[in-house]
Amino acid sequence: MHFLRLLLVVSSVLLSVSTRVQSRPLEDRNKDTSRRESSTAINATVLILGGGVAGVIAARTFYEQGIDFLIIEARGELGGRMMSHSFSGITVEAGANWVQGTQTGGGLANPIYELAKKHGLKTQSSDFTGSITTYDVEGQTDFINVVNDARDNYTVLTVTAGARVSPSLADITSRAGYSLNDAKPLDAHAKAAEYLHFDWEYGQTPEETSWIASSWANNFTFESEEGGFSEENLMSLDDRGFKYLIQSEAEEFVEPQQVIYNSVIKEIAHGESGVNVTLENGEFFAADYALCTFSLGVLQNDDVTFTPALPHYKQEAIQSMTMGTYTKIFLRFSRKFWFDTEMGLYADPERGRYPVWQSLDHPNFMPGSGIIFVTVTGDYSIRVESLPESQIKKEVIEVLQRMFPEEDIPEPVDFWFHRWHSDKLYRGSYSNWPANFLQPHHDNLRANVGRLYFAGEATSMKYFGFLHGAYFEGLHMAEEMAGCITDGRCLGLTHFEDVKNAVPYRV
Ligand SMILES: Cc1cc2nc3c(=O)[nH]c(=O)nc-3n(C[C@H](O)[C@H](O)[C@H](O)COP(=O)(O)OP(=O)(O)OC[C@H]3O[C@@H](n4cnc5c(N)ncnc54)[C@H](O)[C@@H]3O)c2cc1C
Ligand SMILES: *[C@@H]1O[C@H](CO)[C@@H](O)[C@H](O)[C@H]1NC(C)=O
Ligand SMILES: *[C@@H]1O[C@H](CO)[C@@H](O)[C@H](O)[C@H]1NC(C)=O
Ligand SMILES: *[C@@H]1O[C@H](CO)[C@@H](O)[C@H](O)[C@H]1NC(C)=O
Ligand SMILES: *[C@@H]1O[C@H](CO)[C@@H](O)[C@H](O)[C@H]1NC(C)=O
């Protein structure tokens, strides 16, 4: 009787210990080493899956700590979503284009800004709020006061979000946040103005976006008083592409034979003894550990198979964060016929229809280039991707004709956009945090599953969506893995088996 009681107590203590230590410790170092000595077939201690910013920055830590690694990358170059395109011979950026937030005084610097300086990248500051001409279906129409109001309303949104954080009020959508602050855009001008300050940054609508987390992302990047870098947006104008900064950085610590290019991974098998990776062409790689840096969009779809399937908490986290799409549609004309400001804002009766126009044919950027580009986001991007290029071109020209009724809009000499949502290596542009995505969900998104680790912009709580988010996550995750590999500190990252309501439902 007493013995049984004791047994029960002991087993329940053991049970609570095993649920509290949420990630199972991996094997200790000695066991690991002896296994490695007896195993003949590993290609590297760590496989880095994907050679974007997160993968390259992780490689630097492995190099510094003497841990051998291989990067496996689907494309023929490093950089990932830092993807340039030769648009009638001129380098434009299909993906990331700006260092967002640089540095204020001697404060915290954006590491991407530091890389841009270190590698001599050609850049120029963009003015996202002070150099705008406004248009609607009637042509040029001055509603700049509405644009400025929308900017102030966005600021109010981020400030009032802060008032929810310390009492731990539930996160709700940015739409609800706007409305609670009496910002309820109803006409086309107000909607376009709101779009410029919101969707154009997050790649999704206020309805689709958290109020609190989106405000963090803004503050930690742009608000120096909140630990952010600065309000500046520094545009890459480098002929070698924005990607040059990460490719050039990689040359310092990645040997050519350490990158396996043009290799699309099809399957990732993970277990207690290591991680195996199989390519589409059947090639096979084995390692003790792997760091998966694929975009959230890739993880959400079935482009890569995990064996065994990822645990339910991991899958729930992956499917609950969202992947936004941000599409830049480039046009080149034989002559410039548009605004002299950096940007044009077009208010269509349909919110999000070809709204934000940016001129590269501007004294600060590429004067004489004849290039202008328009950005669409979210569902409108998905719509655009589902249609043939000829139709999008026609629609875009029709919008220009409305913006400039006096002009006879000529046929562009070149037209191009990248289909990020359909691209199986990305499945969207960058992640966005929805209102029902809770902090434990995010911990689960970041958590390792045994020897398989994850890093990328989406795993960054402070900077999801940004290049610097990918940078910091590559760095932190490699440090975590290095601690395990070299010192046997293999506790792993925290995860929650179940994400629960703070207060149970009463139905
Ligand atoms: C249109 C657009 C505009 C953006 N604008 C900005 C901006 O101005 N400023 C900013 O800070 N951020 C911007 N971003 C976001 C920024 O580009 C990303 O946050 C960052 O590049 C992500 O880096 P990553 O290493 O996490 O992922 P990725 O760059 O996606 O790296 C993952 C790598 O994995 C590879 N891969 C995928 N699937 C496989 C597979 N099956 N097998 C092998 N390899 C595979 C990919 O080719 C890729 O190289 C933008 C993104 C886009 C798309
Ligand atoms: C990886 O190891 C396998 C054997 O396990 C071998 O067939 C393959 O060629 C190796 N790949 C590289 C790039 O060394
Ligand atoms: C964002 O920054 C503003 C301005 O400093 C601050 O008042 C607010 O609390 C911050 N918001 C969040 C969510 O931290
Ligand atoms: C900004 O918010 C105010 C209320 O504070 C509202 O009257 C105004 O219409 C809003 N403007 C826009 C463009 O949302
Ligand atoms: C990896 O491949 C090796 C050799 O085929 C095998 O022994 C091992 O069990 C595999 N590991 C996993 C996690 O699938």
Image: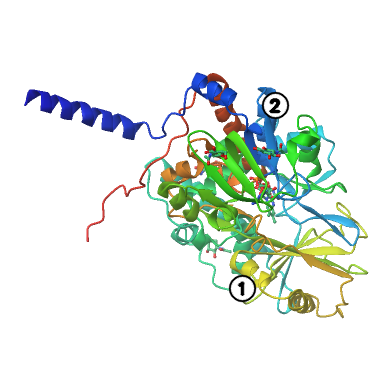
Please name which of the two marks, 2 or 1, marks the residue nearer to the observer: 2
Residue 164 numbered tag: none
* Alpha-carbon span between mark 2 and mark 1: 53 Å
> Which element is circle 2 on?
helix
Side of 89 where 405 appears, left or right:
left
Q: Position of residue 271 (x, y in %)?
A: 49, 38
Q: Position of residue 91 (x, y in %)?
A: 86, 54
Classed neighbour count for the residue bearing mark 2: other residues with Cα under 10 Å, few (<14), some (14–19), many (≥20): some
Look at 69% across and 64% down and name the residue there.
Answer: 144
Side of 25 where 424 appears, left or right:
right
Quarter the N terminus occupies:
top left
Residue 296 at least partly seen: yes
Residue 63 numbered tag: 2
Q: Nearer the viewer, residue 443 or 130?
A: 443
Residue 188 numbered tag: 1
Q: Nearer the viewer, residue 488 or 506?
A: 488
